[in-house]
Image (tube, rainbow, N blue to C red):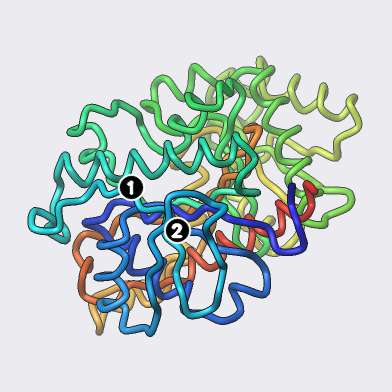
Amino acid sequence: MAKKRPILGITMGDPAGIGPEIAAKVLAMKEIYDICNPLIVGDARVMNEAIGIAGVTLGVRPITAVSEATFTRGTMDVIDLHHVNMEQLEYGKISAMAGNAAFDTVKKVIELAMANQVDGTVTGPIHKESLNLAGHHFAGHTEIYAHFTNSTDVAMLLVDGNLRIIHVSTHVSLREACDRVKRGRIVKVIQLLDRACRQFGIQSPRIGVAGLNPHASDGGLFGGEEKAEIVPAVEQATAMGFRVDGPIPPDVLFSLANGGFYDGCVAMYHDQGHIPFKLLEFIWDNKKQRMESVRGVNITLGLPIIRTSVDHGTAFEIAGKGIASPEALLDAIEYAAKMAVSRA
């Protein structure tokens, strides 16, 4: 159903965090309406207060259905779920109420996308402890999306600039992550990464696959996973027609990719991919004692719908102060719009 300007459902995230504030800042940008029709899914009262915190000029228009949205600059259309008690809401605090509100918005935006009422979804940050305190026992957005879309082969992709890093596993223990390094899973994420790169306009993606062990095991000196699982996966993917190198020592791969040598990378576990990505994209200003810049997009691949997100958390320490950077959310919206147009 994607049109020239796709409809994007954007969740407000945890209402006690910076999600509502950065959503308000982004929807106050005129250029947003050049690439999409944005629709906030959350609580109209929270968003109205967030507009004041953000210091932007916007009106709030509570609606109950996508068909009621006008997508007019200067007015924020909000699918209003009425799930936040403003008298109980405390910025920067973990609570079951905030966790339940965040969960409700994610579930709702998934329902809208599965019903083809929105062309893509963009999620604000949630707090896992609040989520679980509310009785929703998921490790994060990826797992919620997989559950409600009945998807089994999903993967997390981090994107910004030249860096495109997909993960064989994410929210599991390091011990379990090592056990999940299997040929079939590696081949699957290579396929997902290649497809995503083509959606981004890269015609013939070159993909680098990280080793699991130091120096990619140095020929078996530091572990056997490379020989047993990663090398066969790379060989199989190559035989399938993908441009793949590996296993490459992890301490080299991401520098090559950042310089443009690779169009995408396969990381074997969460921190292997997240640490180099966030080292480059999260810039701390020690004088101001806060993040000067926070960039990066988290994309869930392997779903029947589009889902992009900021790659940062709720930032409880600055929530409600009006200083949160909207850069990552703007990037996430731009990627979702690009993917929706590509899919049309």
Q: Which residue is mark 2?
A: 40
Where is residue 124? Give x, y as percent: 41, 54
Foreground disc of the pair 1, 2 = 1
Say above or below: 234 vs 280. above
SS category of the residue bearing label 2: strand
Q: Which residue is mark 1?
A: 81
Count residues near mark 2 (Cα–Cα under 10 Å), then give few for <14, some for 14-19, many for 20+. Answer: many
Q: Quadrant of residue 30?
A: bottom right
- Name the residue located 28 percent from the left edge and 45 percent from the top edge: 127
- Name the residue located 75 percent from the left edge and 19 percent from the top edge: 232
Label total for image: 2
Q: Quadrant of residue 191?
A: top right
Residue 55 located left or right of residue 39:
left
Q: Residue furthest left?
A: 87
- Name the residue located 37 percent from the left edge and 77 percent from the top edge: 292
Residue 225 located left or right of residue 235:
left
Q: CA distance from mark 1 to mark 2?
A: 11 Å
- Name the residue located 81 percent from the left edge and 27 percent from the top edge: 237
Looking at the picture, tell me which residue is in the foreground, 101 or 194.
101
Instruction: Specify the amino acid type for callout 1.
Output: Leu
Q: Residue furthest front?
A: 68
Where is residue 172? Give x, y as percent: 39, 27
Count residues near mark 1 (Cα–Cα under 10 Å), then give few for <14, some for 14-19, many for 20+. Answer: some
Say above or below: 86 vs 34. above
Whichever of labels 1 and 2 marks the residue nearer the N terminus, that label is: 2
Where is residue 173? Give x, y as percent: 36, 26
Instruction: Specify the amino acid type for callout 2.
Output: Ile
Say above or below: 79 vs 132. below
Residue 36 located left or right of residue 109:
right
SS category of the residue bearing label 1: loop
Give the number of the disc on residue 182: none
